Amino acid sequence: MIRVQSEDFDLSLEVRKLTEENPAIGAVTAFIGLVRDIAGGTEISSMTLEHYPGMTEKMLREIETEAHQRWNLDASLIIHRYGQLAPGDQIVLVVTCSKHRKAAFESCEFLMDFLKTKAPFWKLEETPEGGKWVDARDGDTKATERWLKS
Amino acid sequence: MKILYFAWLRTEIGKSSEDISLPAGIQTVNDLLNWLPERGNNYAQALQKRDLLRIAINQDYADLDQKIHDSDEVAIFPPVTGG
């Protein structure tokens, strides 16, 4: 399941909804990304996430489908927010559910790595010097490539 | 053709989308990127960092040699930074 929204989300509520009707699930892995108050040594007062409506949903669905092809998952959820966020706010939630922990752990990391390099989101940081678009990181590309080799 | 711009491409070009009729001879993504700078300095400025441009045709990532058509939705944007 995927959701692209401006509203916040509640981890425990989302996990309960995923697991309550499926007692076969024995493992749940969750990742939450937060807005930090410092980036590259610069203080950030807020961050605005822009995205490409339509393509965002399409890419997230493709990434999720790929995870289900690679691992035996019983359920998964990706929530990504857009709009203006403040330091400490939640940006993204990825939850994976499987019978045993290995599939849940690995697929959660896979989903985050792919999301960071494929899903069309862009971060604009508000700093004392004005708005600054965040540059893509080489490390994120390498993290994604790692999954292509295996 | 509908063209969409995101992030700093949107701010540098000064619009988020536009509808344009493709001139004859513009057949690929690469042709489009070579032609767009003729529309003004803001285009030339924004599109000069070629290695920082990502292209999507009808909401799928596309390569430079991919064919484009008048009915397509083409998006030009910098490398993504979500998550």
Image (cartoon, rainbow, N blue to C red):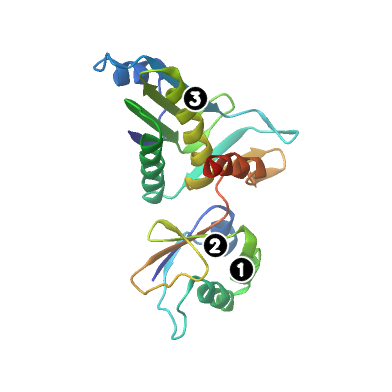
Residue drawn at (40%, 16%) of the image? A27
The CA distance from mark 3 to mark 2 is 36 Å
- Give the crowd class for mark 2: few <14, some 14-19, many >=20 residues within 10 Å: few
Q: In this view, does B58 lie to the left or right of B5?
A: left
- Give the crowd class for mark 3: few <14, some 14-19, many >=20 residues within 10 Å: some
Q: Do the residues labelled 3 and 2 touch (CB within 8 Å)?
A: no
Residue A39 seen: yes
Q: Position of residue B6 (x, y in %)?
A: 51, 55
Q: Position of residue A37 (x, y in %)?
A: 65, 28
Q: Is label 1 on the same chain as label 2?
A: yes
- Give the crowd class for mark 1: few <14, some 14-19, many >=20 residues within 10 Å: some
- Ranked by sequence position, the earlier of labels 1 and 2 is 2
Q: Are marks 1 and 2 in contact (CB under 8 Å)?
A: yes
Secondary structure of residue under mark 3: strand
Secondary structure of residue under mark 1: helix
Please, which residue is most extreme toward the front here?
A: A150
Residue situated in front as seen by the camera: A64 or A6: A64
Residue drawn at (55%, 76%) of the image? B39
Q: Position of residue A135 (x, y in %)?
A: 65, 46
Residue situated in front as seen by the camera: A54 or A70: A70
Q: Which residue has dot 1 on it?
A: B42
The CA distance from mark 1 to mark 2 is 8 Å
Q: Which residue has dot 3 on it?
A: A31
Q: In this view, does A40 lie to the left or right of B44?
A: right
User: Which of labels 3 and 2 is toward the front?
Assistant: 3
Q: Which residue has dot 2 on it?
A: B14
Of the residues shown, which amino acid type is indicated by label 1? Asn
Residue A92 seen: no
Locate residue B54: give its quadrant: bottom right
In the image, residue B35 above or below residue B60:
below
